[in-house]
Amino acid sequence: MSLLNVKNLSVILATNDGPARAVRDLSFSLNKGETLGIVGESGCGKSMAALALMGLLPELSETRGEILLDEENLLDKTEAEMCRIRGNRLAMVFQEPMTSLNPVHTVGNQIMEPLQLHLGLSESAAREEALHLMDRVGIPNPEARIDNYPHQLSGGQRQRVMIAIALSCKPDVLIADEPTTALDVTIQDQILELIQNLVQEDGMALILISHDLGVISENTDNILVMYGGAAVEKGGTEQIFNELVHPYTQGLFAAMPKLGRARTMRLVTIPGTVPDLINLPAGCTFTDRCPIATDICRNTPPPLEEIEPRHAVACHHLQEARSRKTEELFS
């Protein structure tokens, strides 16, 4: 039995121009101690899927499908029930700490709040644990920083506070949306190592959302590639990195800077832009940017089919995509 099982999750947002299908029929599962990386360009639905798991979608949004946490559907929970789950069994590190932290409360109080609310710690015990968490995530001199307000900290320190809050109750599932964006390389490694240690020690499941494919490759067991709100390829991290089957996956990896490349050489880019979620194409959402698209791609959505154990791809031209080298597709 999976710890987290997402089945056919769809999110429809209400906009002035009409309904936007931000997430479409997304399915995946996570066991205790497993890690999943979600990759894709901005606007592909990664963060919206994470907010759906947390029950933090914008008002007037519609959610379909199932989000099963220990076989209990979170979409059936009341807001009061979700408040007991959120921050306790499910926690999230948000991408922008300045808009996630409360500017009128000290960072110490914000770390202490879930400890008191969910674990029932006294104020003194919560403060002691908050100091310990601040030290663990690499905030220097936590005794002096614990009574600071968010604006008194650097961007990297604010991000570390967010991570401390998310880790405070040792959640069953941690969702990290670009958790190390504001951190320098040294602290980034420390934070990722800390998260990995908690996953291993406490059996915590991790969903890591990142644009950094290097971070994903080193810190996840499985990868889910999203485009146009849907999964276009998913499988084991090693499988995805070795195979690169879907043309979009190939484009993402081709755009990565490579050691030894001459400085005068231009990076590979995927032509075009992500599709408008209000007016998605009738067929494959990657059609307008795909170098091997044909009429069937324009008219018929490709099913997500398993091509080998634990590796599924949504493409009408799997054999052709696999036979070509990435450089040939996007040169």
Image: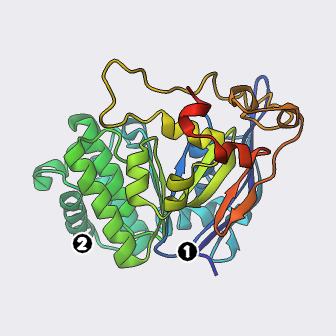
Can you give x and y, in whole percent of width and height, for residue 322 in the image?
65, 48
- Give the SS element for disc 2: helix
Q: How many residues crowd mark 1 within 10 Å: few (<14), some (14–19), many (20+)?
A: some
The quadrant in which residue 320 appears is: top right
Tag shown at residue 31: 1
Q: Eyeballing the image, is 139 above or below 133? A: above
**Amino acid type of the residue tagged 1 in the rendering:** Asn
Q: Residue at x 73, y 42 (%)?
A: 61
> Label 2 vs label 1: CA separation?
31 Å
Q: Residue at x 23, y 41 (%)?
A: 184
Quadrant that contains the C terminus? top right
Do labels 2 and 1 touch, CB within 8 Å? Answer: no
Question: In the figure, is residue 247 to the left or right of 42?
Answer: right
**Amino acid type of the residue tagged 2 in the rendering:** Ala
Total tally of numbered discs in the picture? 2
Quadrant that contains the N terminus? bottom right
Q: Eyeballing the image, is 200 above or below 151? A: below
Q: How many residues crowd mark 2 within 10 Å: few (<14), some (14–19), many (20+)?
A: some
Decide which of tag 2 and tag 1 comes sooner along the chain. Answer: 1
The answer to whether residue 7 is seen in the rendering is: no
Q: How is the image coloured?
A: rainbow
The quadrant in which residue 323 appears is: top right
Q: Eyeballing the image, is 310 above or below 265? A: below
Can you give x and y, in whole percent of width and height, for residue 134 in the image?
22, 57
Question: In the figure, is residue 114 to the left or right of 329?
Answer: left
- Give the SS element for disc 1: loop
Q: Which residue is mark 2?
A: 125
